[in-house]
Image (spheres, grey):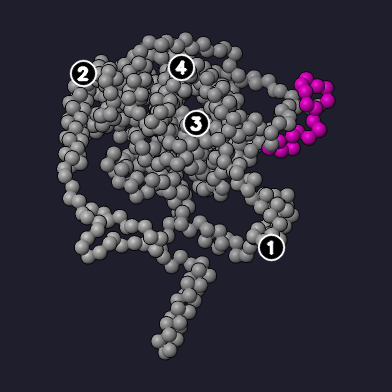
């Protein structure tokens, strides 16, 4: 009895310790990360319940309606609210860049660039503009991992006084193709095989060798840049050559670059695999923790600039998104800094519903004149209409600072729906009016694009962008590893293409591939030999008696 009482006291003391620990709201365990503390952080900010629980229509929930057993189930509006919304709480997943994370912050102008653009967001040293940014993996679904070898995205929405400006960037400075028609076909090569439901490297290299212009972008992915050490430690590039104009209507042609202030860092295949085994959400966790800990990620925004006169003198197409601008043909100008200092409070509201469109431009930035950009202006609007509805610009995270339109009705959100303003133009009843942009360039540049294949950018990448022999060898190993499962004749076409880019590259990838293939074949032979070896068989019924049974009467299977 004495022992029982002592045990009971010990249990009570332990329970009280737990209660005291929880009620104290103190982080006694200093290993807790901000991602682990979110719920307790909320409780500390709100020491009392935030209010009455209501049903969707706003009427309060009565406590007896929170249990449906032995109640009038079909009259319980809370139950109907719960399941009708739960069944529809998912919206279509993004076709690309589905998996990601976002944050709020601001952009600050640090240099005078009025000579190049009249865009208000980039004029006035010290001016700050609110922004939202989203970081993502290009090809992973929502349930994927952060650490595959592929390019990443960084999309930034500037809430300017002249409308929203969206800059959609990639972690590599070139794109894969020039023709917008190729987008669907490229994506299908990197998604799951329609029969096997697995990723098929043969389809990737089949498409690559039939469209050799893609090879330069693929080289960047196969280099160290292909696996950044988190979103904070990568540069980002809006890819296109933008036309910009100043207050005099003078034009310049620029490429925007976001340069990380955290320093570029990358992971090897082995490092990425080790992290993925422990934390497949490494990128998102690292990003969230950094902001929550006050280590705000920042990027410098700069532009590489050409004048109309420069454009006429270069010996390459400066609007070709599959190649870099050549050194010595442009100069670089600093604009400002982007700082992200606030994690989102609700991922669905602020990130999943965020709609970034490269066609969202502002006065002073007429935009790229080439075909790929024109195609993207159509595609992005169409996919956002599908995912979020025709009125997606009325969703809170997408709303501009100022908006007066003749758009009416449709699927919510419609917000105020322009109330009683005239709904047609022109009208004589003081509806919103257009303006005259006196600074807009009068001349329109016509870009004539070629479908000719040029492997010079890929040759330059292999010989000069890969800065040392160690990086070059890792690049070759990555290529060879990707080719192990590729079937002939696609394998032969790929090796031939690499020889055409650079003979040394083709020879070294061929040798590395043969070594890896021999290793795989040896492993498979060893596995087959092991599976063919005789295995000892144990008689389940022994002289000691019948096999053991569980409570349901089924025979236990004895592992051999």
Question: Dot 4 surroundings within 10 Å: few (below 14), some, or many (20 or more)?
Answer: some
Magenta residues (range): 413-429
Dot 3 corresponds to which residue? 95
Q: Quadrant of residue 320?
A: top left
Position in image of residue 206 (x %, y %): 34, 20
Viewer-nearest of discs 1 and 4: 1
Question: Dot 1 surroundings within 10 Å: few (below 14), some, or many (20 or more)?
Answer: few
Question: Dot 3 surroundings within 10 Å: few (below 14), some, or many (20 or more)?
Answer: some
Viewer-nearest of discs 2 and 1: 1
Principal secondary structure, stretch drawn in magenta: loop
Position in image of residue 393 (x %, y %): 63, 33
Dot 2 corresponds to which residue? 503
| Lower sequence index among marks 4 and 2 | 4
* Alpha carbons under labels 1 and 4: distance apart: 61 Å
| Lower sequence index among marks 3 and 4 | 3
* Alpha carbons under labels 3 and 1: distance apart: 43 Å
Q: Quadrant of residue 397?
A: top right
The one of 218 and 361 positioned closer to us in this rendering: 218
Q: Is residue 74 above or below residue 185?
A: below
Dot 4 corresponds to which residue? 179
* Alpha carbons under labels 4 and 2: distance apart: 28 Å
| Lower sequence index among marks 3 and 2 | 3
| Lower sequence index among marks 2 and 1 | 1
Q: Given contact means CB atoms under 8 Å apart, are the residues at marks 4 and 2 in contact? A: no
Dot 1 corresponds to which residue? 64
* Alpha carbons under labels 3 and 4: distance apart: 19 Å
């Amino acid at each position: 009895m004495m022992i029982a009482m002592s045990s009971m006291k010990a249990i009570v003391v332990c329970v009280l310790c737990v209660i005291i620990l929880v009620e104290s709201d103190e982080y006694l365990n200093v290993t807790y990360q901000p991602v682990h503390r979110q719920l307790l952080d909320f409780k500390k900010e709100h020491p009392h319940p935030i209010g009455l629980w209501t049903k969707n229509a706003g009427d309060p929930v009565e406590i007896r309606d929170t249990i449906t057993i032995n109640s009038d189930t079909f009259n319980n509006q809370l139950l109907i609210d719960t399941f009708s919304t739960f069944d529809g709480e998912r919206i279509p997943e993004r076709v690309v860049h589905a998996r990601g994370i976002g944050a709020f912050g601001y952009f600050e102008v640090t240099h005078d660039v009025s000579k190049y653009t009249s865009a208000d967001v980039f004029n006035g040293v010290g001016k700050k503009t609110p922004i939202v940014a989203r970081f993502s993996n290009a090809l992973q679904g929502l349930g994927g991992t952060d650490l595959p070898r592929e390019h990443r995205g960084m999309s930034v929405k500037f809430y300017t006084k002249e409308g929203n400006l969206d800059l959609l960037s990639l972690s590599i400075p070139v794109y894969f193709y020039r023709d917008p028609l190729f987008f669907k076909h490229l994506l299908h090569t990197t998604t799951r095989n329609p029969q096997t439901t697995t990723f098929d490297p043969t389809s990737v290299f089949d498409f690559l060798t039939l469209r050799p212009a893609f090879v330069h972008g693929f080289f960047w992915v196969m280099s160290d840049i292909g696996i950044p050490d988190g979103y904070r430690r990568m540069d980002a590039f809006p890819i296109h050559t933008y036309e910009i104009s100043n207050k005099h209507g003078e034009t310049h042609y620029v490429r925007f670059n976001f340069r990380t202030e955290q320093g570029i860092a990358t992971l090897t295949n082995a490092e990425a695999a080790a992290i993925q085994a422990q934390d497949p959400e490494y990128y998102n966790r690292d990003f969230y923790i950094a902001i929550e800990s006050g280590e705000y990620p920042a990027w410098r925004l700069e532009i590489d600039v050409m004048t109309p006169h420069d454009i006429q003198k270069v010996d390459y197409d400066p609007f070709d998104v599959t190649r870099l601008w050549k050194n010595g043909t442009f100069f670089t100008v600093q604009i400002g800094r982007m700082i992200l200092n606030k994690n989102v409070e609700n991922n669905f509201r602020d990130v999943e519903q965020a709609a970034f469109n490269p066609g969202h431009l502002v006065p002073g930035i007429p935009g790229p004149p080439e075909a790929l950009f024109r195609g993207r202006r159509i595609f992005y609007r169409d996919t956002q209409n599908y995912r979020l509805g025709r009125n997606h610009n009325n969703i809170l995270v997408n709303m501009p600072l100022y908006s007066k339109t003749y758009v009416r009705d449709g699927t919510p959100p419609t917000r105020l729906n322009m109330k009683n303003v005239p709904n047609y133009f022109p009208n004589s009843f003081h509806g919103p009016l257009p303006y005259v942009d006196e600074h807009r360039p009068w001349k329109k540049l016509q870009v004539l694009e070629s479908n000719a294949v040029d492997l010079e950018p890929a040759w330059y990448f292999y010989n000069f962008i890969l800065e040392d022999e160690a990086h070059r060898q890792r690049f070759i190993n990555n290529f060879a590893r990707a080719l192990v499962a590729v079937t002939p004749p696609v394998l032969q076409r790929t090796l031939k293409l690499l020889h055409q880019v650079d003979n040394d590259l083709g020879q070294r990838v061929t040798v590395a591939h043969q070594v890896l293939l021999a290793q795989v074949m040896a492993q498979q032979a060893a596995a087959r030999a092991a599976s063919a070896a005789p295995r000892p068989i144990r008689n389940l019924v022994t002289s000691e008696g019948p096999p053991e049974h569980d409570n349901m009467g089924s025979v236990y299977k004895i592992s051999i």
